[in-house]
Image: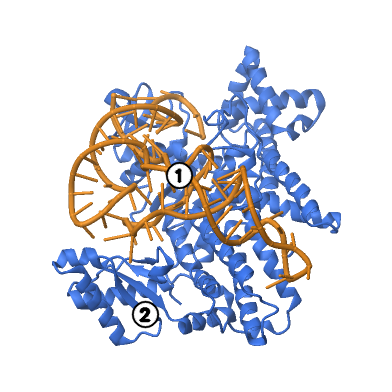
Chain colours: A blue, B orange
Amino acid sequence: MNTLKHTLNQLVGEALSIVCGLADCDPNVITASKPEFGDYQSNGVMSIAKKVGTNPRQLASDVVEKITADANPLIAKLEVAGPGFINIHLSNTALMQRASEIRSDTQKLIPTTNKVDKIVVDYSSPNLAKEMHVGHLRGTIIGDCLARVLERQGHEIIRQNHVGDWGTQFGMLISYMRELRASQGDLPTELSDLESFYRAAKERFDADPDFADTARSSVVKLQGGDADHLVAWQQFIDESLKHCQALYDKLNVTLSRKDLKAESFYNKDLDGVVKKLEDASLLSVSNGARCVFLPEFTGKDGEPLPVIIQKTDGGYLYATTDLAAVQFRSFDLKVERSLYVVDARQSLHFQQVFAVARKAGFASENISLEHIAYGTMMGRDGRPFKTRSGDTIKLVDLLDEAIRRAHELVSQKSPGLDEATYLEIAEKVGIAAVKYADLSKNRTSDYVFDWSSMLSFEGNTAPYLLYAYARIRSILRKQNSGLESVQITSVSESTERNLLLKIMQLSEVVDMVARDCYPNLLCNYLYELAGLFMRFYESCPILKADTQLRDSRLALSALTAATLKQGLDLLGIETLEKM
RNA sequence: GCGCCCAUAGCUCAGCUGGAUAGAGUAACUGGCUUCGAACCAGUUGGUCGGGAGUUCGAAUCUCUCUGGGCGCACCA
């Protein structure tokens, strides 16, 4: 089943083409900007009229006449308005017809795609040297949402967690670990707090030149494959991954160990990357480093800007690894799209990597490489969190605080439940609030981290959506016999009709999110959906209505619940029966 | 210096490929629980869409320019 928007675009587009004589006219049908304009509006007539040199209102009314003559059952009424808009009013019967199809199988709320793509979604990708902080939240949940959305559409999704496990810091960490292990046995207990472990190692590194030397030689030994160092490294990585996994589980993020493709995974390919660049005559030596210079990139003072492939000391850099990753995704995984959900500050890096990859043949021609950039989460001072000075907030602390506040609230709002229930509700509500606070913002803008907005439970927040869902479930529990076969037979109240139309539009929003990768569109949609339900709930008695009307409203409520649940699931937010 | 991103109500933010009178939340004030869950609903107040110019039937949206922020620009990732 096509979306309403898609169907209308086809319908109006064909009529428009016939009437004006131009092939493939875009009628530009969008949801109506105001209720008095109907359900949808076509904005495309004016520009087409301009193109063919006719009066836009005349053209619009010709189109209306043409469509009316064909008597499409979906359309109740068409009107020409303003300078040449066509306002589209849908037929109630058709809406209810569609609704009953979906009622029989709510999976139809989001139709599966007829062109299945294989898609890599690269997200989260923390540096394993340190513990995840609040700045890691965005990429992790935006990426997870996109993966869920695309997967739900039927695409074949390959999640890739490109964790940093191979940088210079690991020499320092391993050295420190070996030092502690010598004095206190196998796994140092300090490792349980990665953050302070890192800080202690760093202090040691800065304070003691001998230690710094040991650390530097550790890197060389590690990368040279020294068995003892590899063991220590592996232990450290395992420990760090446990921290990450605990957070993913807590956040209800779908990443697991099998999605790991660490930096170190590409080690074996790096020599080949250099070789390939050499063969393509793209490599040149500058100040001792091997670089690729592309004319379209210049740096300070108009100097050509290099992509450094190999350092003077022979070490590789992240551009090298990223090229290997492009190659792996393009030729081994053979994907159509590769999404990089990474901080916007790395835009230039990705532009360069993508350009080099195209030029040198690391990317096949048909792969779409997309940097899904997101804005930086700033500290109170309006500047990005400084990871080096460590004045960040741990992600786990944010989540715990959210859960604590949710617990306080739920025990106050819903007295009489047992402690285990409170804990379950608090966990889900708290985590949902944090995720939604971030997902509901346009991903491209920077924003200042703020406890109160992150942990708000009122207004446009996850608890509002969860509350709407819980309300519906509460009603359905009171009247739960044989609802499956009950259909929506009334949309005569405007709140009923608005709600039903909104439900039909989930798939349109999902299409947009899949195409443009903006999860906040889905948040906006769900908030509006929940709002429409709240209004319907206030103005239309459900359980007290006469039998037929009651059943229709129960069916509408049940369909709303299904829509909310599926939408929230795409955001990675779990629903609750009670809260 | 060059490049990318941003500037919308007191605060936090939406605004879909340019569409009709720019919307929410929050804060403030008012009203609504003996009636399906008040984490809710209804209402009031709140705007020169940073300034200016241009493109056109139409601009918060596109172009230019100025101002003010953020970020990036050689061996960290």
Q: Is residue A194 left or right of residue A275?
A: right
Which quadrant of the figure contains the C terminus of chain A?
A: bottom right
Q: Report, in whole angstroms, how far the alpha carbon at label 2 lies from the one at label 1.
A: 39 Å
A445 relative to A174, above or below: below
The residue nearer to you, when weighing B41 against A66, is: B41
> Dot 2, how many residues are within 10 Å of its Cα: few (below 14), some (14-19), or many (20+)?
few
* Visible residue check, residue A465: yes
Q: Which residue is mark 1?
A: A444
From where the camera sits, is residue A375 visible?
Answer: no
Answer yes or no: are tags 2 and 1 on the same subunit. yes
Q: Label 1 lies in what chain?
A: A
Question: Which mark, by number, is residue A77?
Answer: 2
Between discs 2 and 1, the one toward the N terminus = 2
Nearer to the camera, A166 or A571: A571
Q: Nearer the viewer, mark 2 or mark 1?
A: 2
Name which residue type carries label 2.
Lys
Is A372 left, or right, of A430 in this rendering?
left
Q: Report the amino acid beneath label 1.
A: Thr
Q: Position of residue A58 (x, y in %)?
A: 20, 73
Residue at 18 percent across and 74 percent down: it is: A20
- Write down the quadrant of residue A349 in the picture: top left
Please give the chain letter of the residue carrying mark 2.
A
